[in-house]
Image: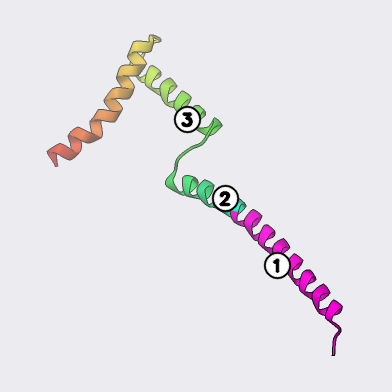
Amino acid sequence: MCTKDAIYKTRAKQGNKRAKKAKQDRKKAAGSVKRHKASMKRVAGARTGKAKRRAERDARRQAKEAAGATGEGMSVDASSVQIEAPKTATMEN
């Protein structure tokens, strides 16, 4: 049979273990949430940061070439036409 002191010592050790595990779990959970959100963004096809800017820049360049003009107004018109085109198609259908 254990002495009283030994019992308290093992209890303290168990408590420390539990606290350490809880801390690890918290850290792990925080990381996994961030990863999950990031993966959801990728699944949704949303581009983030640099890729997004690059896509916008390419789209603007294509619109400008299609309009055959270097003016900013033209590129804006071309992009607005692209956005409106699917709406009218769905209305007709």
Q: Position of residue 64 (x, y in %)?
A: 39, 17
Q: Nearer the viewer, residue 66 or 44?
A: 44
Contact (Cβ within 8 Å) of mark 1 with mark 3: no
Tell me the kind of residue under disc 2: Arg
Count up the numbered dots: 3
Residue matched to label 2: 35
- Relative vertical location of residue 88 with respect to residue 77 in this rendering, above or below: below
Magenta span of residues? 1-29
Residues tagged 1 and 2 counted as in contact (Cβ below 8 A): no
Residue 54 in the figure: left or right of residue 79: right
Residue highlighted by disc 3: 55
Where residue 10 appears, as percent x and y from the top left, is 81, 75
Q: Which residue is mark 1?
A: 18
Please identify the residue farthest to the bottom as the structure is shown: 1
- Say which residue appears at 33% left-offset and 23% top-offset: 79
Of badges 1 and 2, nearer the viewer stands 1
- Identify the amino acid type marked 1: Arg
Residue 32 - label: none
Please provide percent x and percent y for residue 25.
Answer: 64, 60
Picture quarter containing residue 67? top left
